[in-house]
C-alpha cells in the first residue's frame, strides 16, 4: 500500500487505510511526541490526540510537501497545545546558573536513541521545546518565537541553556554508568 | 561542542522509531464507523417507487381517452391550423328522416366532409359543410375506433387514420335516405378537431358547439351519454417492489457445559445491541384470476447491531526511582534508589455498527382476496440465501476485539429462511396497486456454522411497503 493510496483511502474515510496509517507512522511519530513530553504516557496521549486530528484534517491535506512532515507538524502542534504558554516565560525567569560541562564525543556515540530521549524529556518544558524545534525540526528562532509566544531572544537563550543542561545530564549519566561498570 | 551535540542528537533521533503498541493506538483513535442509513435509503426508494406509480396514474387520469360527454367537451377548435387539409373524416349518421330542424348547422370542423346522399362539395375557401347525411354506427376517437349501439342517430367521426377524400363527405346508411336539410357548417379558419364523440341527434336537431372560431348560429346538438369503454385485458403477470423494516430478535447461546463460553456469550450480549433489519426486493409474479399468485425475484437484507466496548489495559515497566527511605535515630534520612515498577493504565472505548448483509432469492406464494379497489393478500414462502457478508467487531473469549469478517464462525454461503405475511393493497389504477402489510421471517438455521463455539440466530417481525405493476 503506497503513501498516496493511504492518503486517498483516509480521505474517503476507509478504516482499512486509516489503520494502515496508524501502524506505519506511529513509531516514527512516537519518537517525535516523546521528545516533547515528560514521559511516554504523556507522549502516547499526545500521539492519540494527533491521530484524531489527522483523521479530521486529512481531507484538507494537499500533497505539496512530504506527508510525514505534515504528520510530524500535527504531532508537534498537539504536544505544544498541551502546555501552558506562560510556562515558557516562567522558566526563562527562573533560570539558575548552569554549569557548562563538555561532553566528550565518545560518550555521545556510546549512547542509544532511548538514552538520549530520556534526558531530553527531563528538560524543563520551555528548554525542551525550543531545543526540539531548533535542533531536530530545523525551525528558526523567529518561527519558534511565533509558535511558543515568546521573544526570539528568549528562544535563543533557552536553546543555550537547554544545551548546557542536556550536556550536564548526559555527563552525569555517563558518570553513573562508569561507576556501575567500575564497581 | 554544541554543534556536535546537535548533530549527534539529530542523527540519532531524526529517523528513530520508538516502540509503540500501534494496534492499541489504532483502537483508541479509530473514528466511529459511519452507519450506513440503509433503512432510510430503502424507505426513500419505496416512497420514490410509490410516488412514481401515483404520478404515472395521475398523469394517465389527466389525459383520458373518454368516449362520453357532450359535444362541448368533444369538439374544440384551435385557430391557426388548416382545417381543410386534415385527413380526418366525419360521418354524421342518423336515422331521423324528417325531424331534423331545417337550417341547422352541423359543427363539423377540421374535416373534409361530404355526404353520399347529395354529394355536396366542400371548398377550402368557405369551409362550409352541407348537413345532409346519413348514419353509421361507428365513432373513432384519437384513432381508437369504438363501436357503440345507437338508439336514434349516431354521429361518427374518425379523427386521423382513415384515408378519405378531402372535401367530400360520405354518408352511409342502411336506409339510404337522409331528408334533413341543414345549412352548411361555418367553420372558423384554422379550426381543429381535437376530440370526437358519438352523439345522438334528437328529432329536433339542435346543435350546440362551443369552441374558438365557431359561429354562434350553430344549432344545438344534444349529446347522449356514451357507454363506458370496454375494460382492457390485464396480463396475469406483474412486477412487485417491496421494502421491509423489521424488528430484530437474536438468540445467542453457548454450550451449557462450558462456563467460559457461556460467560463469553453473556459478555457478547452485554456488548452488542440488536438494532433493526431492513430489506428490499423486486419480484416477478403470476396472478391467477381465481386469486392465487406466485412470485419470485431478488432480495437484499441487512441486519444491524451495535458493538460497544470499553477496555482498560495496564502496562508495567520499571524505571529508576526512589525505592526506600531509611530514617535513623539521629533524624538523618537515607534515600535508596533503584528500579521501581511503574503502572500505566489506558482506557479506550470502541463503538462499531455491525451489519450482516445477505442477498436472497425469495419465492412466495399466496392468495389474494379482492373487493373493489382493495385487496388482501395472504402470502408465505421461502427465501433462499445466496450470499452473506459480515462487517464489524465482536468480543473474543479472551475479551479482545475481533473483526467480524475475519472469523469463520458464520455461514456465508447458501441457506434459507421462511417468510409469511399479510398485505393490504389498494389499486390506484388498473395496473398499479400499492400495498402495506406485516411480515415475519423465521430462520430455522443458525447463522453460525456447527463448528462455531456458539449458536446465533435472528428472527424478524416488521412492516412492508410495496408497489405492484401489472404487465401489459
Image (cartoon, helix red, strand yellow):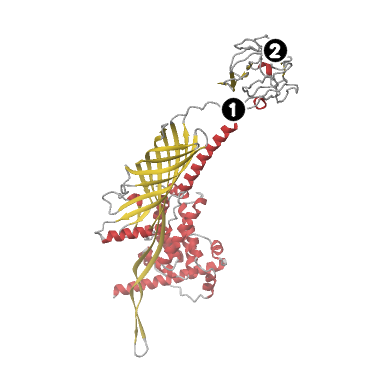
Residue at 66%, 9% in the rendered image: B117
Q: Position of residue B310 (x, y in %)?
A: 39, 62
Q: Reply above or below: B5 against B62.
A: below
CA gap, disc 1 and disc 2: 30 Å
Dot 1 crowding, Cα within 10 Å, few <14, some 14–19, many 20+? some
Sequence-first disc among 1 and 2: 1
**Horizontal and vertical percent position of residue B20:** 37, 60
Q: Position of residue B307 (x, y in %)?
A: 39, 56
Name the disc covering residue B66, or none. 1
Q: Quadrant of residue B221?
A: top right
Left/right of residue B413 with respect to residue A89 in the rendered view: left
Residue at 42% over, 57% down: B351
Asked if marks 1 and 2 touch (Cβ < 8 Å), the reply is no
* Label 2 sits on residue: B122
Question: Residue B148, relative to residue A82: is it above or below?
Answer: above
Q: In the rendered image of this protein, does residue B24 appear above or below residue B446? A: below
Dot 1: chain letter: B
Residue B286 at what x, y percent from top left? Answer: 41, 32
Return the chain for callout 2: B
Q: Is residue B449 visible?
A: yes
Q: Nearer the viewer, residue B89 or B202?
A: B202
Residue drawn at (26%, 50%) of the image? B451
Residue B15 shows up from this direction: no
Helix or strand or loop: what does disc 2 sit on? Answer: loop
Amino acid at each position: 500500500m503506497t503513501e498516496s493510496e493511504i492518503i486517498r483511502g483516509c480521505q474517503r474515510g476507509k478504516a482499512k487505510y486509516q489503520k494502515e496509517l496508524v501502524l506505519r507512522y506511529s513509531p516514527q511519530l512516537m519518537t517525535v511526541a516523546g521528545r516533547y513530553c515528560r514521559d511516554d504516557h504523556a507522549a502516547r496521549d499526545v500521539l492519540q490526540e494527533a491521530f484524531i486530528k489527522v483523521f479530521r484534517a486529512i481531507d484538507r491535506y494537499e500533497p505539496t510537501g512530504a506527508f510525514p512532515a505534515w504528520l510530524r507538524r500535527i504531532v508537534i502542534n498537539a504536544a505544544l497545545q498541551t502546555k501552558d504558554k506562560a510556562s515558557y516565560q516562567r522558566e526563562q525567569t527562573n533560570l539558575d546558573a548552569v554549569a557548562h560541562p563538555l561532553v566528550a564525543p565518545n560518550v555521545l556515540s556510546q549512547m542509544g536513541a532511548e538514552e538520549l530521549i530520556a534526558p531530553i524529556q527531563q528538560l524543563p518544558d520551555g528548554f525542551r521545546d525550543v531545543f526540539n524545534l531548533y535542533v531536530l525540526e530545523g525551525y528558526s528562532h523567529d518561527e519558534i518565537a511565533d509558535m511558543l509566544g515568546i521573544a526570539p531572544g528568549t528562544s535563543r537563550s533557552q536553546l543555550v541553556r537547554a544545551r548546557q543542561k542536556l550536556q550536564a545530564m548526559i555527563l552525569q549519566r555517563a558518570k553513573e554508568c562508569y561507576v556501575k561498570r567500575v564497581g | 561542542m554544541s554543534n556536535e551535540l546537535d548533530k549527534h542528537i539529530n542523527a540519532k533521533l531524526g529517523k528513530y522509531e520508538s516502540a509503540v503498541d500501534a494496534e492499541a493506538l489504532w483502537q483508541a483513535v479509530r473514528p466511529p464507523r459511519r452507519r450506513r442509513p440503509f433503512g432510510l435509503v430503502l424507505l426513500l426508494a419505496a416512497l420514490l417507487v410509490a410516488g412514481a406509480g401515483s404520478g404515472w396514474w395521475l398523469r394517465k387520469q389527466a389525459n383520458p381517452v373518454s368516449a362520453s360527454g357532450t359535444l362541448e367537451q368533444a369538439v374544440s377548435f384551435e385557430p391557426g391550423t388548416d382545417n381543410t387539409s386534415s385527413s380526418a373524416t366525419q360521418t354524421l349518421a342518423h336515422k331521423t328522416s324528417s325531424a331534423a330542424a331545417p337550417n341547422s348547422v352541423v359543427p363539423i370542423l377540421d374535416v373534409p366532409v361530404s355526404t353520399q346522399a347529395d354529394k355536396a362539395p366542400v371548398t377550402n375557401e368557405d369551409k362550409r359543410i352541407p348537413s345532409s347525411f346519413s348514419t353509421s354506427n361507428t365513432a373513432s376517437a384519437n384513432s381508437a375506433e369504438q363501436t357503440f349501439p345507437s338508439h336514434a342517430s349516431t354521429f361518427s367521426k374518425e379523427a386521423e387514420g382513415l384515408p378519405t377524400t378531402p372535401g367530400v363527405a360520405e354518408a352511409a346508411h342502411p336506409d339510404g335516405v337522409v331528408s334533413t336539410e341543414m345549412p352548411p357548417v361555418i367553420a372558423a379558419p384554422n379550426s381543429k378537431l381535437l376530440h370526437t364523440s358519438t352523439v345522438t341527434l334528437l328529432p329536433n336537431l339542435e346543435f350546440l358547439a362551443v369552441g374558438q372560431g365557431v359561429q354562434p348560429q350553430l344549432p344545438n346538438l344534444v349529446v347522449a351519454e356514451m357507454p363506458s369503454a370496454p375494460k382492457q385485458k390485464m396480463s396475469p403477470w406483474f412486477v412487485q417492489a417491496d421494502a421491509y423494516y423489521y424488528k430484530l430478535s437474536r438468540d445467542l447461546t453457548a454450550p451449557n457445559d462450558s462456563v467460559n463460553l457461556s460467560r463469553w456469550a453473556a459478555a457478547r450480549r452485554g456488548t452488542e445491541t440488536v438494532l433493526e433489519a431492513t430489506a428490499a426486493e423486486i419480484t416477478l409474479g403470476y396472478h391467477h384470476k381465481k386469486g392465487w399468485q406466485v412470485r419470485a425475484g431478488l432480495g437484499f437484507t441487512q441486519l444491524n447491531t451495535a458493538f460497544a466496548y470499553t477496555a482498560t489495559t495496564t502496562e508495567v515497566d520499571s524505571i529508576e526511582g526512589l525505592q526506600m527511605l531509611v530514617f535513623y535515630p539521629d533524624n538523618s534520612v537515607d534515600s535508596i534508589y533503584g528500579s521501581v515498577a511503574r503502572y500505566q493504565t489506558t482506557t479506550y472505548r470502541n463503538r462499531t455498527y455491525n451489519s450482516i448483509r445477505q442477498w436472497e432469492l425469495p419465492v412466495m406464494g399466496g392468495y389474494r382476496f379482492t373487493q373493489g379497489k382493495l385487496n388482501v393478500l395472504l402470502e408465505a414462502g421461502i427465501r433462499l440465501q445466496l450470499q452473506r457478508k459480515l462487517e464489524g467487531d465482536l468480543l473474543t473469549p479472551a475479551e479482545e476485539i475481533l473483526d467480524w469478517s475475519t472469523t469463520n464462525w458464520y455461514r456465508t454461503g447458501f441457506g434459507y429462511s421462511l417468510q409469511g405475511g399479510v398485505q393490504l393493497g389498494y389499486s390506484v389504477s388498473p395496473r398499479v396497486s400499492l400495498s402495506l402489510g406485516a411480515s415475519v421471517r423465521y430462520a430455522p438455521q443458525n447463522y453460525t456454522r456447527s463448528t462455531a463455539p456458539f449458536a446465533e440466530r435472528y428472527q424478524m417481525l416488521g412492516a412492508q411497503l410495496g408497489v405492484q405493476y401489472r404487465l401489459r
